[in-house]
Structures are given as structure tokens and as C-alpha cells.
Image (tube, grey):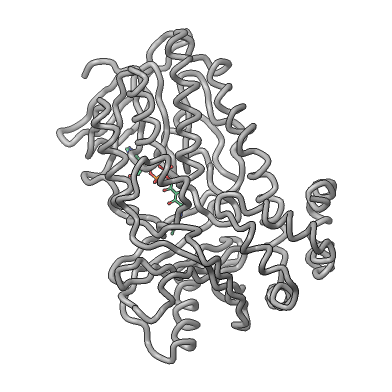
Amino acid sequence: MPTTDVVIVGAGPSGSTLAYHLAKKGWSVTLLEEHPLIGRPVQCAGLVSQRVLDMAGTSKMVQRPMGGAIVWGPSMGKIEFAAGETRAHVISREMLDFLLAERAARAGVQVLTGWKFKDIRERPNTPDGKVVLGAESPTGPAELTTRLLVGSDGVASTVARKLRLRRPIEILPAFEADLPFRDAPQDQVEIYLGRDLAPGFFGWSIPDGEGNVRVGVGLNARNGLLALDGYRELVRRMERRYGRKLPSPIRTIVSGIPVGQVPVISTDHGLLVGDAAAQVKPLSGGGIFTGMRAAELAAGVASAALEEGNLSAQRLREYDRQWAHEMGDEMDRALFFRRLFVQLSDADLDRLLEVLKESKLISTIVAFGDIDFPTLTIRELLGQSPSLVHLFPKALSAFFRRKRGLAPDVLAG
Ligand SMILES: Cc1cc2nc3c(=O)[nH]c(=O)nc-3n(C[C@H](O)[C@H](O)[C@H](O)COP(=O)(O)OP(=O)(O)OC[C@H]3O[C@@H](n4cnc5c(N)ncnc54)[C@H](O)[C@@H]3O)c2cc1C
């Protein structure tokens, strides 16, 4: 196998986006995917913003536009947001991955399916040296040589471990199932809150526009509840609401959502993008937009480093800086609000929905709602109604006991 400038491990949205941009800049790129079919198995609810379609350069994978959301509190009180326009898209995630890999292949990327990255056999000690890596190919063990190794191999990234880069602070277990169920609202995403089904996170029901709903939960593992049990509780709640049994799932997903900023995402001859680098929105668990945007940034830095023949950690650290500059504040604020959110009891959550419903704040949420930058909306809400934070004295004092000194500038908006 000849040397390629870059080997990228994992043909999800982040890896295929990076591969495409590097090939467009003239670099030889090999993209390894352990599964025989790109996009399978699906591990996603497929809710994305217009930015993702723009970055992908196509909207072929869109199944249904979404114009709003319903949030159900623990006691099943609800608030409804209807934007009257498209705010997000439900997509076929399988098709997104396929289209992005196809675009990369058209640009000249060598896509190797059924190839699993195993380990790093040799690492150079010069900035222009080569990495030798071991893989399992469909015909047996293989070696590849490259100037730059990229881990876009998802939440359980083997590349991150082999590059000795630190893992995310928290991985939230998630369970999702596709059910053939037409009774759910067709142009609204539904969010379910409550400690019995999703302590520290939330449950969701997302129509796919083809007569199915994607019903899932993510949760904080430290609460001792399994994601499958949370999912079963969510199904029970939905059954009570609809007054009938939900059909059996036709597809299930067990996965994890990385939460928390990874301090370093580049090293000598190595980079991480996407879930492998925990580039995931901490409040929603969405990582397609952030992973693809990180891939665009990584492509610029990697290309310049390849050009200069300097793949040192020091040179590649420019990628960390660009990521922090563009997304660091949003990620930090989102982590801050998430830490606050996990302190809220069910009674707090019910009360929050009540207050939002009674005040004029719903219109603020509708006006500012942006699924990629949710903290802008939260800041706007706090700016209009600073007393919101004082609704939860117990949660706040627990929070400040644990995180002294973090909050005031954020709460001041
Ligand atoms: C239940 C659930 C629902 C979600 N819903 C949404 C949503 O609605 N919207 C959203 O934006 N995000 C969502 N996410 C998050 C989103 O799925 C991820 O952030 C996104 O997939 C990250 O893309 P990626 O390319 O970084 O990694 P991945 O999509 O995980 O791709 C990694 C690829 O690497 C391959 N791979 C792994 N190890 C190896 C190896 N050793 N060798 C070769 N190949 C390897 C894998 O097979 C995979 O194809 C959801 C996550 C979960 C768990």
C-alpha cells in the first residue's frame, strides 16, 4: 500500500468532510471505515440545522422540515414553540454519510470500507516523518504509511487512545428506537424531561416524515438508570398520552454521547475531529454540525502543515486554537448551563415550564432559537428575565458549592 499524505479513520460526517476538503486541496487521502456499508449502522436521530445542508452541499437527505418543538415536563405539562418556518431538518443519517463519502471519493479520496484501524506501529521523531499504522483489512492484517493520522472514529475513538490524547469528561449512554407510528406530531420535535426517564439529559420523539418516529433517551450514567430503562419509561409515558400501545421498534441504537471539552485535539502527526474530539453540543448532544465545522477548520490547518512539511504538535495546535476561537465560548457556556440543568429537580423543571408558559419568554425562544447555538437563546432569556435563575435556589446553591467562581459573567449575559 503506497504512502498517502493523510489517513483518516472513520467515514462519519466529520471524517468524510475532512477527507473531501483535503483532497480538494490536492493531498492524497485514504479514508478507512470499519463497516462494509457507509452510514450503517445508523446511530443518530438525524435532526440538523440548515448549516449542515450548506456544508454538505446538498439537501438530498432531507426527509422533513421541522417548524417547532413541544417540551413535556416531568408531570406532563407542556410548552409549545411554533416558529411558523423551518428551523431544523430531519434527515436520513444513512444518506448523509453516504453522500459525504461519495463526494470525498469523487474528489479523489481512496475510501476503504471494511478496514478497521488497530494500532500505531511507528511514530516519527521528525516533523516531516511518517507514521506506520496497523489495520485489519477484508483480506487480513495490513499496514499503511502516512504523514498525518486523523481520528474521526467516533465516541469510542481508538485513534485518540493510540495517540494518547485525553478522552471526554463524560459519555452519556443513549438508546433510540425507530417505531412505525403516525400519531405523533409530524412537524414538531418532542422533548421529554424527568428523572424517571432521563436524569441529567432528556428524551425525544422525532418524526422522520415517512410514518416513523425516532424515540430515544440520553442520560447521566451516574444516576444508575440504564438507557434502555429510560427508553421504556419514555414509551410508557407516550402510551399513557396516546391511550394505546406503541408498535414494536423496527430499529434500535445503543450508543454514547461525549460531553465536555477535550483539552488537546492535536499532537505530533495526529488530529481528532468530531465525536472523537468530543466536539458535541453539550445541551443537545448534537454533533453533526460541530464535527463537520471542525473538519473544515482541521482541513485548513492540516493542509498548511503538509505544505510546510511540519506535522509537529506545535504546528497542528493551530487547529485547537481555531476550534477554541470559533466554538470555545459556546461550548463553555453550554457546559456551564448543563451543569446547572443537572441540578434541577423534577419540581424545578415543572416550575420552569410554567414560568416560561406564563411569561412572554416563549416568543423570545421562538425568535432566537438556533439549535447550533442554544446558549445565545438562554442568554437572551436571562437578559430579559434575570430572576429566572433565582427560581431554583436549591439547584443554584448546590451548583455553586461544586463550581465556585465559574458563573457570574455567564449569568450576567
Ligand atoms: C442516539 C443518538 C442520537 C443522536 N442524534 C443526533 C441528532 O439528531 N443530530 C446531531 O447533530 N447529532 C446527533 N447525535 C450525535 C451524532 O450522531 C454524532 O455527533 C456524529 O455522528 C459524529 O460524527 P463523527 O463523524 O464524528 O463520528 P461517527 O458518526 O460516530 O463516525 C465514526 C465512524 O468511524 C468508524 N470507526 C470507528 N472505529 C473505527 C476503526 N477502528 N477503524 C475504522 N473505522 C472506525 C465508525 O464505524 C463510524 O462510521 C446523536 C447521537 C446519538 C448517540
Q: Is residue 5 depicted above or below 284 in this figure?
A: above
Q: In the image shown, does 364 or 254 lie closer to the viewer? A: 364
Q: Is the N terminus in the top left, top right, bottom left or bottom right quadrant?
A: top left
Q: Is residue 391 depicted above or below 264 in this figure?
A: below
Q: In the image shown, does 302 or 3 lie closer to the viewer? A: 302
Residue 156 in the image, given as x and y percentages of width and height:
44, 44
Residue 159 in the image, given as x and y percentages of width and height:
42, 33
Residue 68 in the image, given as x and y percentages of width and height:
52, 67
- Identify which residue is drawn at 58% across, 70% down: 81
Q: In the image shown, does 387 or 4 lie closer to the viewer? A: 387
- Identify which residue is drawn at 36% across, 42% down: 12
Q: Is residue 156 depicted above or below 106 in this figure?
A: below
Q: In the displayed structure, does residue 323 sit left or right of residue 60?
A: right
- Identify which residue is drawn at 72% across, 64% down: 343
- Identify which residue is drawn at 43% across, 10% down: 307
Q: In the displayed structure, does residue 4 sit left or right of residue 272?
A: left
